Image (tube, rainbow, N blue to C red):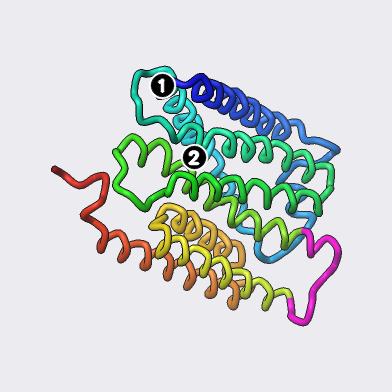
Amino acid sequence: MKKSFKLYAILNFLVLLFVIYWNYSVGVKGLNGNTVSTLSSEYQNLFTPAGYAFSIWGIIFLSLLAQAIFFISRAFSKTKDSDFLSQVGPYLILANIGNGLWIYTWLMEYTGISVVVMLGILASLLIVVLNTNMERWNAPRPIIFWLWWPICIYSGWIAVATIANISAYLAKIGWTGPFTEITWTIIMIAIGTLVNLFMIYTRNMREFAMVGVWAFIAIAVRHWESIPAIQWTALISASVLFIAASIHGYKNRATSPFKLN
């Protein structure tokens, strides 16, 4: 087995452990007198979902931990088809380093820089998607479960977080443009919906889109009965994505990893 595979697997595991610890530490103690949630509240923008939506990070980190263990097991086994470790390793490590750096820039209130970092995380994850031709070939179940799905969930949330991050930055500098804040939020939900539909129909990444469903429902919950236009736009968008993913999954049921042989 190539030494680089082992190096990537070990580095990915260590970086991930540090990022989880760092997220927990600043979540409890804060930094610069801020926590992620309090600062998000300070930069009020209508795209930010209800607070419970951020609990998805627990699922993301658990799936990434399982993935990291899978990477190590493959790197140190005699299995020959582990080239994905070199396709994924450097970029996933960069994404996780970016995750930790984003927390720092956000809490230090370098909001503009945090947007750049977030875009870097998203770009790194999309490179992983492209390098592995993710969800576009009939991979064995371990690859689907432990390589594809954690990245789908991670990148799906980062895509939503990127829009929210940009919205927070614009709110901080007081930029509104030619539309009202409600109209801008509806436009951003529409853009998010199109991005998720694109990932369903061109990449078969239904799991990516289900994260969008989660986020849009949380946006609707936050604005329930207070801003009906956003509430219903978010609910309709979530419904469209759920239905699209369900129909796509049904049409492609022959390639489902849960199909009985």
Mark 2 neighbour density, 10 Å: few (under 14) some (14–19) many (20 or more): some
Residue 179 part of the magenta segment: yes
Residue on which disc 2 sits: 59
Q: Secondary structure under badge 1?
A: helix
- Where does the image place residue 71, in percent across and percent down from the top left? 45, 27
Up the image or down, 169 lies above or below 2; here it is below
The residue shown at (33%, 49%) is 137
Distance from Cα at disc 2 to Cα at disc 1: 21 Å
Q: Give whichever of discs 2 and 1 has the lower sequence position.
A: 2
Nearest to the observer: residue 7 or residue 38: 7
Is label 2 in a helix, a strand or a loop? helix
> Where's the N terminus, which quadrant?
top left
Measured along the vertical axis of the image, is residue 56 above or below residue 188? above
User: In the rendering, which numbered label is found on residue 73?
Assistant: 1
Q: Which residue is more in the foreground, 195 or 74?
A: 74
Quarter containing the C terminus: top left
Image coords of residue 102 (percent x, y): 72, 43
> Residue 200 vs residue 154: left or right?
left
Q: Residue at x 46, y 66 (%)?
A: 197
User: Which residues lie in the magenta part?
Assistant: 169-180
Mark 2 residue type: Ile
Q: Position of residue 63 (x, y in %)?
A: 47, 36
